[in-house]
Image (spheres, helix red, strand yellow):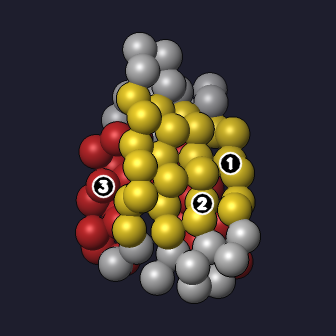
Amino acid sequence: MSEIKLNLKGMQCPGPIMEVFKASKKAESGDVIVATVSDRGFEKDIQAWAKKTGNEILDMDVTETEITAKIKMK
């Protein structure tokens, strides 16, 4: 199991979710993607994506300036 860190600050929709998607294609089962994003729409996008793909959101930290999501690959 490895951790894949993505700094996606400054990108606008759909960029961050597309980068998470690309990383998920390279990830193995049990890997955790940690995505840090400044786009406010990402919170809703990543929740919908995780539900659709069956991946699990382990943690989501939302501040005024950024969102950091930890997503475990199925």
Q: Would you identify the image quadrant in which residue 11 lies?
A: top right
Residue 4 visible? The answer is yes
CA distance separating discs 1 and 3: 17 Å
Tag 3: Cα neighbours inside 10 Å, few (<14), some, or many (≥20)? some
Q: Which mark is residue 33?
A: 2
Give coordinates of residue 66: x percent, y percent. Answer: 50, 25
Q: Disc 1 vs disc 2: Cβ atoms closer than 8 Å?
A: yes
Q: Secondary structure at mark 2?
A: strand
Eyeballing the image, is 53 above or below 35? below
Residue bearing the label numbered 1? 6
Eyeballing the image, is 51 above or below 7? below
Picture residue at 50% right of the left edge, 53% below the top: 70
Give coordinates of residue 20: x percent, y percent. Answer: 56, 59
Residue bearing the label numbered 3? 47
Q: Disc 1 vs disc 3: Cβ atoms closer than 8 Å?
A: no
**Residue at the top extreme, as displayed:** 64
Q: Secondary structure at mark 3?
A: helix
Which of the two labelled residues, at mark 1 and mark 2, occupies the earlier sequence position? 1
Left or right: where 15 falls relative to 39 = right
The type of residue carrying mark 2 is: Ile
Picture residue at 64% right of the left edge, 39% below the top: 8
Tag 2: Cα neighbours inside 10 Å, few (<14), some, or many (≥20)? many
Give coordinates of residue 45: x percent, y percent. Answer: 34, 50
Eyeballing the image, is 8 above or below 65? below
Which of the two labelled residues, at mark 3 and mark 2, occupies the earlier sequence position? 2
Give coordinates of residue 51: x percent, y percent. Answer: 27, 69
Which of the two labelled residues, at mark 1 and mark 3, occupies the earlier sequence position? 1
Residue 15 visible? The answer is no
The type of residue carrying mark 3 is: Gln
The type of residue carrying mark 1 is: Leu
